Amino acid sequence: MRTRNAAFYAYICSNLKTLMKVFIAGLPLEVDEAELTAVFGDFGPVRSLRIIKDRETKESKGFGFVEMANDDEAKEAIRCMNGASYYGRRITVNVAEDKGPGFTGGGGGNKGGFRRN
C-alpha cells in the first residue's frame, strides 16, 4: 500500500504545473479583462486575470495581474509584450513580485497621534 501511495504522489507532482504571476502596468483605461485574457491567451492558458480597479469609482487603475499555467509561456508573453504599444500606450510587463501577506505599501513609522516632548 505504501508503494502505491508514493507512486500516486509522484504522478500528481509530476503533472502539476507551476503558476507564474505576471504584472502589467500602463494599461489603457478602456481595456477590460476579457480582452486582456484573449491577448495573453495567445501565449498559453490563462488561469486568472485581474485588472485592479478603484474601490469607489470602479475604474481601472491602469495595472493588473495575470496568472499563466506555464512558466515558459509566461516568460514569452513578458518578452513579447514588455514595452509594446497597446492602444497607443507603452505597457510594462514583468514577473510579479510576491509582497507577502499583510503588505500595505505604507512606510510605517510614527506619523500621528499624541506627541510627547
Image (cartoon, rainbow, N blue to C red):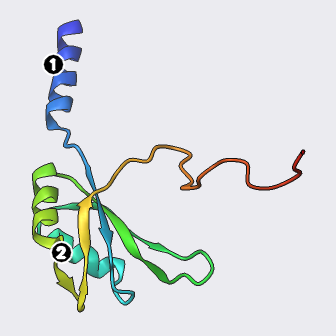
Q: Is residue 23 above or below residue 31?
A: above
CA separation in Å, label 2 and label 1: 45 Å
Q: Is residue 33 above or below residue 11?
A: below
Q: Secondary structure at mark 1?
A: helix
> Could you say which is closer to the camera, residue 93 or residue 77?
93
Please identify the residue farthest to the top as the structure is shown.
Answer: 2
Q: Which residue is mark 1?
A: 7
- Residue 112 appears at what percent x and percent y? 79, 56
Image quadrant where one finds the C terminus: top right
| Callout in the foreground (2, 1) | 2
Quarter of the image where one finds residue 56: bottom right
Q: Secondary structure at mark 2?
A: loop
- Residue 15 appears at what percent x and percent y? 15, 37
Quarter of the image where one finds residue 30: bottom left
Q: Which residue is mark 2?
A: 83
Please tell me the numbered disc located at residue 43. Answer: none
Residue 1 showing in the rendered view: no
